[in-house]
Structures are given as C-alpha cells and as structure tokens.
Image: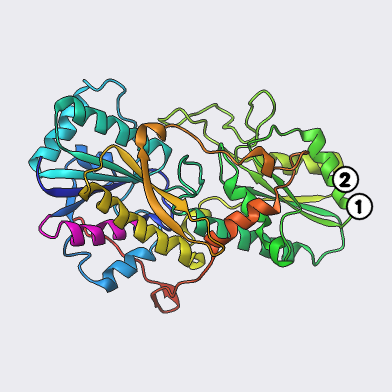
Amino acid sequence: MGNNILIGQSGGPTVAINATLSGIVKGCREYYPDAVYYGARNGVKGILNETLVPLNEQLATEEQAYALETTPSAALGSCRVKLPKDLSDPMYDQIFAVFAKYGIGVFFYIGGNDSMDTVEKLSRKAAELGSDLRVVGVPKTIDNDLPFTDHTPGFGSAAKYVATTVQEIACDCAVYSDPSVTIVEIMGRDAGWLTAAAGIPRLYGEDCADLIYLPEVDFDSDRFLEDLRRKFRERTTLVVAVSEGIHTSDGTLYGSDPNGKKDVFGHTLLSGAAHRLCELVKAELGCKSRSVELNVPQRCASHCLSATDISESVLLGKAAVKAVFEGKTGVMITYLRNDDPAYSVRFGDVPVAQVANKTKYVPLEHISPNGCDVSDELLRQIAPLIAGELEIPRRGGLPCHFKVRFE
C-alpha cells in the first residue's frame, strides 16, 4: 500500500465528529507531514464511488481547524452501508483497488457500533490479502453505547443539550397550576445514557425530569401510570424523560414503526414512544398531556457544545494517528478515565472485533428498583463531560459553519 491517509465518517452525525476529523488531520500533519490525507465523501460510499478529496489545503490553518471543530453534522458526509459478511464479495476488491489507486496506507473510520463492523471487516480482509494497510476505528455516538471506552465523542455535548432542554421545559411547565404531564422522548435505542442526562440539573438544585425511563428495564404501562399518580401527590406539573427504545417485557418497542420497517443493519425504525404514552395519559388520567420529541437537535445543537467534549474529540483524533504511527491496526481508540479527584482522561485502544456490534448498557445498579429514575452517582459520572463552553464563530448573530469543498 502507499503512504497516503484516508478518512471517512459514518452513521448518525454528532456535534463532535468534525472535531475528531480535525484532530486526525492535525495528527497527520505531525506524524505524516509528506502524506496526502483524503476525505471520503459519504463514508464507504465515497470509496466505492471514488469521491475522495484532499484535505491538506482546506484544513491548513488553525482558523480553518477551529471552524470545523465547532461545526455540527459530518463535514465529509455520512452513510449507513453494511459491508458483506463474505470477504470474497467483489465489493472488497473494489475498495482495495481504490486504496491502491490513491496510495492509501492508512484508513481511519469515524463512527459508532455499525461503523466498527466495517473497520473489523476491512482489517480482516487486509490480513487475508497480506496487505500492510492499517485500519483504525475512531469512536463517535451520542448514544454512548460503545464498550471498552469510558464514553464516546459527541455524547457530552448531546447530554448537555438534553439536560439544558429538559431543565428549560420543566421551568416552563411549572408556571401552570392545572395538572399536566409533558413527556420528552430522547434518543437511545438500546442504551439509556443520553436519557439519564435529563436528571443532571437536580445535582445543582434545578428543575429536571421527575421520572426517567431507560430501555435497560422493561417498561410497564400500568406501573408508569402509578408512578404518575404518586408524583402528582407531590406536584401538579410533571416532566417525564423516556428513551426512544423503551420496550415491554416481550421486547415490543413502544415506538416501533407501525409497518415494521428496518434499516440496512436490521434495526427497527422508531416512531413516537412519547406520543403513544401521551395518548395513554390523556385516556387514563384525564389530564393535559403533550409529547416533545427532541429528535435531531440532540446531535446537531452546536450552540450547546461541551468544551470538554470538543477538546477531547480533537485529542482522540490525534491519538488515533499516533496509534497508527506506532504500528497499530484493527483497533478502536478509547477514552480511559483517570482515577484522580479532578476529572481527566487518557487514551488507549482495543481490538475492534471486541467492539463491533456490541452494546454498553447503563448498569442496572444505577437504575432505581422501580425503573423510573437513575442514581445521583451516575449523574455525577456524566456531569464532567458536559462542562465548559466554546466561543463559536458567528456572522450576523448566526453560527458560521465550515464546509468541505468536493469540487
């Protein structure tokens, strides 16, 4: 293989995935100053379509890098492509032919669970071919559900947005004296880390979610109604945070697509757990109820960036390049939390085969016995990740976003 670098982004965007891209580019300048570092447009699709763009000049200055780091979404574009299980599939020959054509010796793929599946397959294919191509997975996901890493880039900023928004919703709802229930649906198909963040404001004596339901525990509608009745004895306006992936004991998702549609990775499409619960409350309790689906803003609210999240994401990208420089391949870069009174992290790596298609769940010991709240200890673990603010470049009062030029 050659000496050039290729970087791709995959899966759902976050406000930190571009900061990791910036970190990788900075690392490339430090460790591989003579290489061309390409960006693949729309992840694996960009490789298959040969839509690669050199990033050396577009990200040559600190000003350009900072603009990228504070821009939401995936600057290179994203995709949800599942590579064939059979490594003899012609798709792999096509991918490795593109690697050879552009002199690619290193491929960084920034993504979540499904993206690590891609890294694992390409690593095995390289070994099968006897290729010296190095492939490294660089984590991202607001769901925080990748194992073997303390947390994931993008989670801290998304958690900050969730905590802030739920606090503001609770403050707004409290102005009325009539009984009401506001149900806030938060991303998290399998793991409830992000939904748990709805409780963080209570660490500081602020309004927050009165009830919190995660997908780690089976959801029971009768118990839910009893939880509401109990809370109504304490106050008249209630705010409930629910993960989009809450499910009954038989595995039925409350927000499953009514037509049973699934994505390319076999995940059931979700559509409206909060709305269903809102209708249940109206029918059974007879009080005012409304649903709020936070949806896409959770992962693109750059006005609510966590400075900790962004700075760590840049350093993680640089750590990925350092790992390759030291000869690593077939690994995912990880955060390791230091055991110090003041919060800090260091970087490690883990074989990507141990991560691909695996899920890290919220430990049951941090979920209340009745399944409607989380522990303060868990909230204190998450709290440092949302700390700090960044000055965002603006024009006319609006953010200025960095755009990669593909032509």
Reading the image, the residue beneath label 1 is 233
Badge 1 amino acid:
Arg
- Residue drawn 91% across the image and 52% down it: 233
Tell me if I can see residue 230 in this picture: yes
Q: Nearer the viewer, residue 231 or 273?
A: 231
What secondary structure is the magenta-colored segment mainly?
A: helix
- State the residue position of label 2: 229
Name the spot of residue 191 as percent of width and height, x first.
57, 40
Mark number for residue 290? Answer: none
State the image quarter where residue 403 is shown.
bottom left
The span picked out in magenta is 20-35
Residue closest to the eye, 20 or 93: 20
Q: Amino acid at mark 2?
A: Arg
Are discs 1 and 2 less than 8 Å apart at CB? yes
Quadrant (top left, top right, bottom left, bottom right) of the N terminus? top left
Magenta stretch encompasses residue 31? yes
Q: Position of residue 93 (x, y in %)?
A: 16, 28
On whether residue 151 falls in the magenta region, the answer is no
Q: Secondary structure at mark 1?
A: loop
